[in-house]
Image (spheres, rainbow, N blue to C red):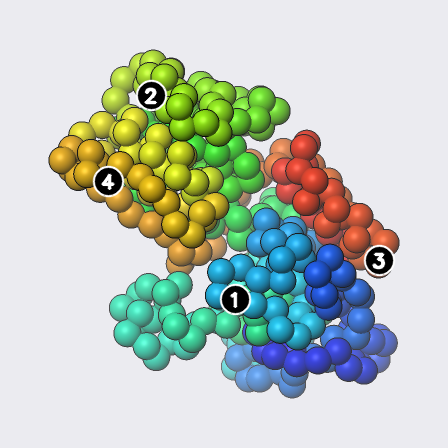
């Protein structure tokens, strides 16, 4: 049900007598249905949130098309969506930092807070994580949901609900920059100019990177990256035969050492490019997960002492994301290219637009 829970579509009375609580359910491959969504009882540390902005992520589309991502398999109907913001409508008795009417951005993962990962501060690695729209747990594309209050972050007055929903993808970029140790003396290469590549680029700039080069196979995405502040862009191919020449082009575009590379695509070629282009003693961070397995030049990277790190989601990023948005260090508004309401027809059309790609970067629902 809500609060990262399991459940089935059922008559769903909404507190306050406002009728049924409706949600977008993934019921079969390429099939989404708006149906009732029963909320759980409000716990003492929970809040009930009326959703106002929910973005479509690539993982949502992947579940729609394949009914699985890696070992996460959709075996029964599941509410979709995890990039979200809304307005508090009810608070549990133990919630002191939020009040009815507050606008909040929601962090979608509920960890156990008992395992060694959680106790060690890396709760994103929790083995018992209950994450929105990751089977068997339901997501947030619904009229209302129930969520722990400590995972709801009050929006600054000058940050919109849409921008609040964008904290989720932005968190990936922020966490990647932390893991890659991006800073004011680190030139950054980003492989992939899709939504995650773009938010990672914006994050790297906010972290102080003096020069950023971004590479992609798509001219339109590169033009968007340039408009958002990339210092240089390089169009690459999908052919490994072009690898050596493209590395030379990327290094020339940087005009100096590449200290950090962030692979936001996650394919054998993009990771190979990142590993080979990065200077000796530099760092490569694998962000995207295009391939489950890769063939990459690790020996070459090892003898140059190139450090390789990965990321899984994020941790403790919402406060910093909101500060970046409040201060204007990051502007995510240009990334929101398409907007839809919350009807059966619009939900279907929105997912079609997002899956098609082309000029769509972030597709947003306004509920």
N-term-proximal mark, 1 vs 3: 1
For the residues marked 1 and 3, what is the alpha-carbon distance in whole angstroms? 27 Å
Can residue 320 be spotted in the picture?
no
Camera-nearest label, 1 or 3: 1
Report the residue at 38% width, 70% height from top.
126
Q: Position of residue 353 (x, y in %)?
A: 73, 42
N-term-proximal mark, 3 vs 2: 2
Few, some or many C-alpha atoms within 10 Å of disc 4 (few <14, some 14-19, many ≥20)? some
Report the residue at 56% width, 40% height from top.
195
Q: Give the quadrant of the N terminus.
A: bottom right
Q: Which mark is residue 298?
A: 4
Which quadrant of the figure has residue 27? Answer: bottom right
Can residue 28 be spotted in the picture?
yes
Few, some or many C-alpha atoms within 10 Å of disc 1 (few <14, some 14-19, many ≥20)? few
Q: Are marks 1 and 4 in contact (CB under 8 Å)?
A: no
Q: Secondary structure at mark 2?
A: helix
For the residues marked 2 and 1, what is the alpha-carbon distance in whole angstroms? 36 Å
For the residues marked 3 and 2, what is the alpha-carbon distance in whole angstroms? 49 Å
Q: Secondary structure at mark 4?
A: helix
In the rendered image, the vertical position of residue 100 relative to residue 220, given as above or below? below
Judging depth in this view, the residue of 230 and 289 nearest the camera is 289
Q: Which mark is residue 343?
A: 3
Q: Position of residue 4 (x, y in %)?
A: 57, 74
Residue matched to label 1:
72
Q: Position of residue 355 (x, y in %)?
A: 68, 45
Residue matched to label 2:
244
Image label count:
4
Judging depth in this view, the residue of 231 and 242 nearest the camera is 242
Q: Are marks 1 and 3 in contact (CB under 8 Å)?
A: no
Judging depth in this view, the residue of 322 and 354 nearest the camera is 354
Report the residue at 38% width, 76% height from top.
113
């Amino acid at each position: 049900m809500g609060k990262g829970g399991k459940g089935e579509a059922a008559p769903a009375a909404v507190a306050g007598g406002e009728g049924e609580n409706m949600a977008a359910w993934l019921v079969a491959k390429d099939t989404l249905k708006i149906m009732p969504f029963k909320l759980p009882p409000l716990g003492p540390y929970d809040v009930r949130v009326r959703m106002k902005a929910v973005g479509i992520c690539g993982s949502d589309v992947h579940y729609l098309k394949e009914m699985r991502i890696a070992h996460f398999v959709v075996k029964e109907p599941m509410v979709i969506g995890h990039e979200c913001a809304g307005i508090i409508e009810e608070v549990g008795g133990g919630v002191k930092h939020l009040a009815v009417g507050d606008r909040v951005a929601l962090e979608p993962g509920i960890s156990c807070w008992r395992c060694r990962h959680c106790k060690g501060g890396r709760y994103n690695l929790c083995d018992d994580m209950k994450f929105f729209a990751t089977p068997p747990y339901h997501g947030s594309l619904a009229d209302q949901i129930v969520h722990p209050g400590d995972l709801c972050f009050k929006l600054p007055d000058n940050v919109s609900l849409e921008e609040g929903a964008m904290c989720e993808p932005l968190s990936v970029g922020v966490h990647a920059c932390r893991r890659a140790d991006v800073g004011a003396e680190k030139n950054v290469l980003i492989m992939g100019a899709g939504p995650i590549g773009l938010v990672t680029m914006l994050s790297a700039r906010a972290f102080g990177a003096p020069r950023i080069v971004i590479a992609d196979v798509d001219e339109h995405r590169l033009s968007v990256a340039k408009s958002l502040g990339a210092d240089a862009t390089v169009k690459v191919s999908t052919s490994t035969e072009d690898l050596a020449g493209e590395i030379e082009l990327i290094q020339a575009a940087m005009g100096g050492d590449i200290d950090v590379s962030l692979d936001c695509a996650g394919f054998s070629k993009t990771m190979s490019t990142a590993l080979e282009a990065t200077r000796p003693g530099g760092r490569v961070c694998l962000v995207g997960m295009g391939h489950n397995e890769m063939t990459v030049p690790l020996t070459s990277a090892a003898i140059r002492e190139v450090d390789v790190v990965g990321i899984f989601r994020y941790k403790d990023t919402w406060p910093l994301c909101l500060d970046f948005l409040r201060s204007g260090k990051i502007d995510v508004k240009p990334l929101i290219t398409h907007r839809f309401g919350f009807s059966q027809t619009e939900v279907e059309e929105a997912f079609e637009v997002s899956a098609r790609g082309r000029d769509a970067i972030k597709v947003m629902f306004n509920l």
